Image: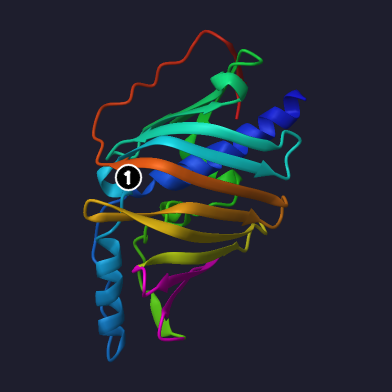
Amino acid sequence: MREGLRLAIVVLLIVMLAGCSAARRRKSAIPDAAGGAVSYSAMAGIVKGYNITEEGFVIRRGKVELQGTQVEGTFAFTARINRDGDFLASVRGPLGIELVRLLAVGNEIAAIDRFNRTVYVGKRDVFMQKNGMPGDFVEILFGDIPELYSAQFEAVSANELIMRVSDMNTEREVVICVDEMKVCRQSVSTVASGHEITMHFGDFKSGGDKKYATHIEMNEKKKKLHVTVRIDELVTGFDEEIVFNLPSYRRSNI
């Protein structure tokens, strides 16, 4: 049971880290290319203007459903992610009892397991590499468009614009739905680790001049994990300091 809970904690950390790493990267414009690609990159720039991670946000009410772990089910969660990409999230079970608290400040990450009175600690960059997540992949869990250098654009229909990026270790395809002007699908394949991750975004809402998906599906082929995130209430704009404060529980590596 403890190992099952540990795997569930790892999955939850993947979900939260995927939403908060964009703010830690230096902003730059998506480069223009010759011909029709200029208008495509301009469109991508408009989509980027709707991003929520760069200014931080607070999820006041949400649910995360885990499948493919020994601890499966639907759990309520709240989260705060600031402009620096630091976050604090609380995952709760029946009767609102906190089961796990997730924390990341700088390159330090931790998961506080209340049930087993254990703190799982590690380094953000090592954790992401271990789980087959390239740095630019984790930028768009919440439907934000990442910084895509040397992207190749292709319009496959009147409503879909595809952006493809590849390097020595990863291949990624990001699909923009023009009617929403948001990322609606993406897939990432990591050659070295064999990880294949697909994501779908839907039920978009606007908050001020920002826009976000309220329904997110993520599948990881290698570990056969399926995660569903539902956001019931989100407020954009959050820039308060998050302190890396851990209880005196038993320590274990994440």
Q: How is the image coloured?
A: rainbow
Vertical comparison of 214 with 76: above or below: below
Q: Which one is nearer the viewer's eye here, 136 or 54?
A: 54
Residue 234, located in which quarter of the rendered image? Answer: top left
Is-magenta flag for residue 172? yes
Q: Residue at x 45, y 58 (%)?
A: 203
Three-letter amino acid code at the position of disc 1: Arg
User: Which residue lies most toward the bottom here?
Assistant: 35
Residue 219, x across and y down, in percent: 63, 55
Q: Residue at x 41, y 16 (%)?
A: 245
Is-magenta flag for residue 241? no
Look at mark 1 in the image and give the residue it sits on.
24
Is 78 placed left or right of 56 in the picture? right
Vertical comparison of 71 with 205: above or below: above
Q: Is residue 61 visible?
A: yes
Q: Which one is nearer the viewer's eye here, 193 or 18?
A: 18
Vertical comparison of 203 with 105: above or below: below
Q: Is residue 135 visible?
A: no
Residue 31, located in which quarter of the rendered image? Answer: bottom left
Q: Residue at x 52, y 43 (%)?
A: 15
Residue 223, x across and y down, in percent: 72, 50
Residue 41, x across and y down, in percent: 29, 76
Q: Which one is nearer the viewer's eye here, 40 or 73?
A: 73
Residue 13, x across and y down, in percent: 54, 37
Residue interval drawn in magenta: 157-181
* Label 1 crowd (10 A; few <14 / some 14-19 / many >=20): some
Is 239 placed left or right of 152 in the picture? left
**Helix, strand or loop under label 1:** helix
Question: Is most of the magenta stretch helix, strand or loop?
Answer: strand
Q: Residue at x 24, y 41 (%)?
A: 237
